[in-house]
Image (cartoon, grey):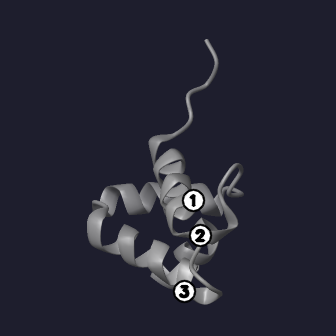
Amino acid sequence: MADAVPPERRMANDIAANLGHLPGDRAAEAVAGHIGRFWDPRMRTRLFDFVDAGADGLNPLVVEAVKLLR
């Protein structure tokens, strides 16, 4: 069976896709705001760990959002 996409990666990429239309830094700020408000701390920690491990498959907006959240 193929490896499943981690839910944090899938959800973060979905958020970035929905907010990516915003101009400039506002998109990353909006992604960070959504994750900061609605994600459980354990989910954020797993996302941070995923970014630290290389962010394979993550939308660049998510990586920028994680920088803002830290």
Q: Secondary structure at mark 2?
A: loop
Residue at 39%, 78% in the rendered image? 33
Residue 32 falls left or right of residue 34: right
Q: Which amino acid lies under the numbered mark 3 shown in the image of this protein? A: Arg
| Residue shown at the point (46%, 42%) measured from the top left | 7
What label sits on residue 26 in the rendered view? 3
- In the image, which disc is placed on residue 63? none
Question: In the displayed structure, would residue 30 be above or below residue 48?
Answer: below
Residue type at tag 1? Ala
Q: Are marks 2 and 1 in contact (CB under 8 Å)?
A: yes
* Image location (x, y in percent) of residue 62: 58, 66
What residue does disc 2 label? 20
Helix, strand or loop under label 3: helix
- Residue 3 on image: x %, y %: 61, 25
Q: Residue 55 or 19: which is nearer the viewer?
A: 19
- Quadrant containing the N terminus is top right
**Whether residue 70 is visible:** no
The residue singled out by tag 1 in the image is 17
Q: Residues within 10 Å of mark 2 (few under 14, many from 20)?
A: some
